[in-house]
Amino acid sequence: MIDKRAPLLTLKMFASNNNEFLTRLNIKEVPMYYYTDALGTTAVSLEMNSRLAGSGLSALMYLGYSSYGGYGEKEEYVLEAKKLDTKETILGMPCSHYLINYRAKDGTKKENEDLKLCIDDQSSINNMYVFSGLLNQYLPGIKMKSSGLSGLILKVGPEKTYDKEYFVLESIKDSKDQVFFDHKKAMTDQQRKQDSIMIAYKKQEEEYAKNDSVYTATDSTAVVVDSATAAVPYSDQTYYYIPDYVSEYKKAHDEDGSLAITNIPSENLWKGLPKHCKNFEKDLPAFKLKEVKGHLRNYVGQMCDMYLTQSASHNVGIKLTLDEIRREVLYLNTIQEKLDQSDKKKLNNYLKNLD
C-alpha cells in the first residue's frame, strides 16, 4: 500500500492454477487470512507453526472466524465496471484501466465511491473473485456481486487519488507451498453458527418489542441501539441478555479442532497465559491407549484459549470453548478406569505439574 502516510497494510496472495486463493492481509502487523474459490470468500485461521513464506510446506487451514456486518439481511449490490482508454505497465506487465462502482437493485449508484483498477485482463490468474470477496467482508450490510471482469489486478486505488494512494503489485513468483482446505464444510459450519446467532438475535428483538411499551427514558445512561429494523431502547433486561443454554458439550467433536492459541496475533498476549501453553503439544506424554493424547491436547489447548479471553481483542468462542473443556474433563475422569497403571500415572503426573 502506497499513500501519503507510512504504509499500514500489506497484502500477499497464494494462487493456484485453479484460481483458488489464500490472501493474507496485514493490518498494522496483525494478519487476517481469507480463502477464495468459486464458492466465495471465507475468513480462515492458519496453524501457528506453519511457515507459508517458506517452500515445500503442507499447511492445514481451518475456519477461524468470519467478518460480517450486522445480523440483518445484506443489501445486494452489483459491481459496475467501465473500461477506460488508458493503460500502464507494472513489473513489465501491461494492464488496462477500469473504473469500478457498485449499484443497488433499484439502480442507485454510490456517489464518490469509484475505484480505479489496472487489470491484466489477459492473465490466466483471475483475482477479481478475491476483490469482490474482500469487499463483502469489509462493507457492513452489503453483499457484493462480481462485475464480470476477469484478470490479475496489478494496481487499485480511489479514482480521485489513484496516483497518490493505491495498492500495487510489488513482486510475483512461483511457490511450492501447499494448502488443503475443505471450503464447503467450513462454509456449512460457519452458516450453522451464523444461523444460531440469528436465532438468538431475533429472540432478543422479540424481547425488545415486549419491553418497548413499558420503557421510559428516566435513566441518564440509557442509549439507543440501532437494529436491522428500527431503533430500539437499551434497558437492563437487554443489557443482561444471554442466549438460552443448550447442552451440547457431550457431543463428539474433533480433538484436532481449532485452537485460538495457534494463531495469536501478538507475542504480547503470551504474558497472560500459563507457560505450558506455548508449544504445549511437544510436551504431551505418549500413552498406550492412543486416543488419550488427542483428548488431553484438546483439554489443555482449550484451557489456554480461555486465558486469552482476558484480552478485549480476543476471538475465542467462549461457550464453545467451555463446552469442549467440560467434554474433555468428563472424558479424562471416566477413562481413568480403563488405563493401566503406567498410563494413569503419566496422565495424573502431567495434569498435576501444569503450572
Image (cartoon, grey):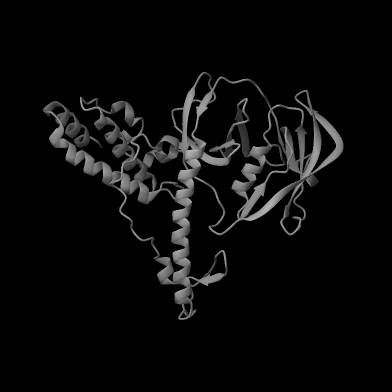
Q: On the rendered image, what quadrant is the C terminus found in? A: top left
Q: Indicate the quadrant where residue 147 lies.
A: top right
In this rendered view, identify the residue nearer to me: 232 or 218.
232
Look at the image and tell me whether residue 6 can be seen.
no
Residue 164 percent across, percent down from the top left: 77, 40
In this rendered view, identify the residue nearer to me: 313 or 252.
252
Residue 185 percent across, percent down from the top left: 47, 39
Q: Is residue 61 left or right of residue 275?
A: right
Q: How many marks?
A: 0
Q: Is residue 83 above or below residue 175?
A: below
Q: Residue furthest right?
A: 85
Residue 39 percent across, percent down from the top left: 58, 39
Look at the image and tell me whether residue 24 can be seen.
yes
In this rendered view, identify the residue nearer to me: 83 or 168.
83
Q: Could you tell me which residue is drawn at 31 percent across and 37 percent down?
A: 298
Q: Is residue 240 above or below residue 256?
A: below
Q: Indicate the quadrant where residue 226 lies.
A: bottom right
Q: Could you tell me which residue is drawn at 23 percent across and 43 percent down?
A: 329
Q: Could you tell me which residue is drawn at 48 percent across and 80 percent down?
A: 213
Q: Is residue 192 above or below residue 213?
A: above
Q: Is residue 4 above or below residue 106?
A: above
Q: Could you tell me which residue is drawn at 41 percent across and 71 percent down?
A: 236
Residue 189 percent across, percent down from the top left: 45, 44
In this rendered view, identify the residue nearer to me: 165 or 16.
16
Q: On the rendered image, what quadrant is the N terminus found in? A: top right
Q: Is residue 263 left or right of residue 278?
A: right
